[in-house]
Image (cartoon, coloured by chain):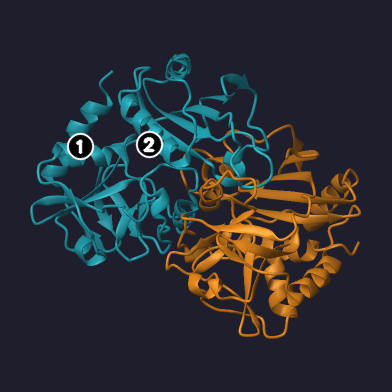
Chain colours: A orange, B cyan
Amino acid sequence: MSALATRVFRGQERVEAPDPADRGLAYGDGLFETLRVCGNTLPWWPRHAARLARGAAVLDLPMPDRDWLQDQLAELLVQAPGQGVLKLMLTRGVGGRGYAPPARPEPSLILSLHALPADPGPLRLRWCRTRVSLQPALAGIKHLNRLDQVLARGEWRDGDIHEGLMLDAAGHLACATSANVFAFIDGRWLTPSLAAGGIAGLARDWVLANEPGAGTTALTPAMIGSAQALFLCNAVRGILPVGQLDELHWPPHPGTERLRRALDRELTVA
Amino acid sequence: MSALATRVFRGQERVEAPDPADRGLAYGDGLFETLRVCGNTLPWWPRHAARLARGAAVLDLPMPDRDWLQDQLAELLVQAPGQGVLKLMLTRGVGGRGYAPPARPEPSLILSLHALPADPGPLRLRWCRTRVSLQPALAGIKHLNRLDQVLARGEWRDGDIHEGLMLDAAGHLACATSANVFAFIDGRWLTPSLAAGGIAGLARDWVLANEPGAGTTALTPAMIGSAQALFLCNAVRGILPVGQLDELHWPPHPGTERLRRALDRELTVA
């Protein structure tokens, strides 16, 4: 699905296209956010801005000026469909050959608008062979080094399969390729801690903060197999109930449906 | 150090700049090679082309047509300095939002020419805190997910320090940020196996193939501390003797010097 509109900036200057020497391209030296657009607004902008700032601190990347960025977003959102997706990429900008970060980087920013994907209904999942990299230095942040997910998502072409679950290096559940995972076990919604790697999603944070008893733990594939319900979640599509994982099937679960509706209200409040 | 000349291609079409939706930028979904240029030629082109093809097989990325690519390289090398560096980036090209690789990708290719860095003499090294990601699915190939190295290289700004050594997830030596490492221990040159992560460099391959007794093993920091000599190597700069690692000092070693001269002859045969 190609973008409805795209804007590229070097520092605060609008440019035609990324520079071939951009460190985002050379090294994946940057961050991204994918936001739900609703009625020309970004209901979760403060949460995304806060996570972007956390990632920028880890990578020692200067954040764009807050007011300037808000202005650019507002200008682009005029073109947004009623419900859509905004992707934001922030890189360390142009650099010479070699890994040493420039002393005074001028970050690049790429903003693009996309249509909201259709609601797929209860998801059909599979297990991926590709595991999430073990890299505690980058755990939790939404950086541009995403070959783990690309390899995992490349494991199937069957259009009937919506998503794949990935294990971490220790063989515990980590995440789906583009969402976090919760399993309902013994009356509680549980999700992996992600201390070793993977993205700590904002929808995941929301569930942990808003669902009584929700928590993090190490989840083995066997525990997933015996879970009473499963859902995926991310900040664009909210809660996505899982209907099937390989040979396992789950009927709709009232707790999933309740959370789905509550998060949908959050994501679509203009 | 900025490029002396750059060419960007989408498929076989020359274009002005990378597309903002290039998957190399979005996900680091691609590969690179850094080659020594000598007298308008690439002495190790067949080795680099073979490694690029191995990486492309891992990522399921189509390789550019061999003859077409050779023609593009030859055209660019007309502008090359007598001794220089050519960087080649190959990405999966433009894609929509989402990790699923396009069914028929049209790869992007970026070629750039750079000056050869000056010979720094015996290197001064430090240990890095950032470790190499544990990701066996990507081990050995030269892909564009290089945040491990960016973080490690960002740990110091002291211009007197040339390079940093990185450990793997298990706490064994993996590599320097942009080179492989050999240590002379009990009469043999030894280098890490890199089964868990890191780039298997072509200069490393050359040493393993050409130096009697050279081999791979797990190297602890203590073993490095008691090594009789240490060198780094890569396909651009050849063998780089190490003079210092934090508080440790090594005098020049005749074995290093012999290997350095032999590899230099290889890299500068036009």
- The location of residue B80, given as percent across then percent down, is 43, 19
Secondary structure under badge 1?
helix
What is the chain letter for disc 1? B
**Could you say which is closer to the camera, residue B197 or residue A159?**
A159
- Residue at the spot 41% in from the left edge and 51% down from the top edge: B137
Residue beneath disc 1: B260
Q: Amino acid at mark 1?
A: Arg
On-image quarter of the N terminus of chain A: top right
Instruction: Report the Cα–Cα distance between label 2 and label 1.
Output: 27 Å
- The location of residue A81, given as percent across then percent down, is 88, 46
Taking A30 as reference, is B83 above or below it? above
Residue beneath disc 2: B54
Q: Nearer the viewer, mark 2 or mark 1?
A: 2
Residue B132: quarter of image: bottom left
- Residue at the spot 82% in from the left edge and 72% down from the top edge: A262
Circle 1: is it few (<14), some (14-19), or many (20+) Cα within 10 Å? some
Secondary structure under badge 2?
helix
Reading the chain from its start, which is encountered first: label 2 or label 1?
2
* B250 left or right, relative to B200: left
Residue A220 makes an appearance in the image: no
- The location of residue A118, given as percent across then percent down, is 78, 50
**Could you say which is closer to the camera, residue B244 or residue B77?**
B77
Residue A235 makes an appearance in the image: yes
Taking A210 as reference, is A174 above or below it? above
What is the chain letter for disc 2? B
